Amino acid sequence: MNEAYVKQDIKNGIATIEFFHPAHNSLPGDLLAKLANTITKAGNNEEAKVIILKSGGDRTFCAGASFNELININDAETGKRFFSGFANVINAMRKCPKFIIGRIQGKTVGGGVGLASATDYCMASKFAAIKLSELNVGIGPFVVGPAVERKLGISGFSQIAIDANSFYEAEWAKQKGLYNQVYNTVEELDEAVQKFAENLCKYNPEAMKEMKKVFWNGTEDWDDLLAERAIISGRLVLSDFTKKTLKRFE
């Protein structure tokens, strides 16, 4: 697989949304926009009763934002637009009236941790370690922070945000509340995700819609909050510290 994509399949009430990028499923701006739009459309599609969010390949769920785009940011407006990409996806997931099941098959970094955190029920393989690496390059996990903190609590969020060099194992993420279930193999994960989604399809759609509102109560300000956080990251990426750090990775 060499072509990046976002695709959707709806079967028996289950909408499966899959994204892929050859660079470890990192997400450039155009893919993030497609992903947000696809989630919104699935939420409005009466054929879909529940949504599965997954990525292609078997090694990495999501490596975060596109590094190539990151190093080419040269003004504040471009920076804000770049960091708003994950904000738009998280807000689309938050507003979606359907439950979103996360299928996390492998390691996930930065913005990918934000996506996992914004799912309503997250299932992972034992290979799905997580890392917030943003401080390593002179910025911080500002945009995904509210979603990650909502699942891990301020203690867990601050731990992985400050310890930006370390991967935290899937079992740690489960203990902290990010992952609801962890499986030994990707095959077991896929089987469990499918069965779980099929069971959810038996529930009253109106009841699930109302429960989703309850679960996300208190996040109504996230459109503004995540936009403000994108501005902070957009400013920091232009700092001398970050520019010098990024040059090491070119």
Image (cartoon, rainbow, N blue to C red):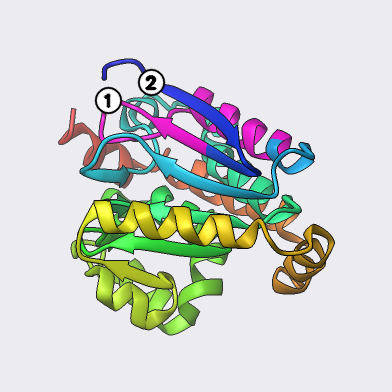
Q: Which mark is residue 22?
A: 1
Start and end of the magenta stretch? 17-41
Determine which quarter of the picture holds residue 72.
top left
In-image side of 46 versus 50 (left or right): right
| Distance Cα–Cα, label 2 vs label 1 | 6 Å
Q: Which mark is residue 4?
A: 2
**Extreme top residue here?**
3
Q: Are marks 2 and 1 in contact (CB under 8 Å)?
A: yes
Residue 237 seen in the figure: yes
Q: How many marks?
A: 2
- Quadrant the C terminus occupies: top left
The foreground one among 234 and 126 is 126
User: For mark 1, does the 10 Å Cα neighbourhood hold few (<14), some (14 to 19), or many (20 or more) residues?
Assistant: some
Q: Give x and y (percent) for residue 186.
A: 25, 52
In-image side of 183 versus 117 (left or right): left
* Residue at image point 35% right, 67% down: 161
Q: Give x and y (percent) for residue 67.
A: 32, 32
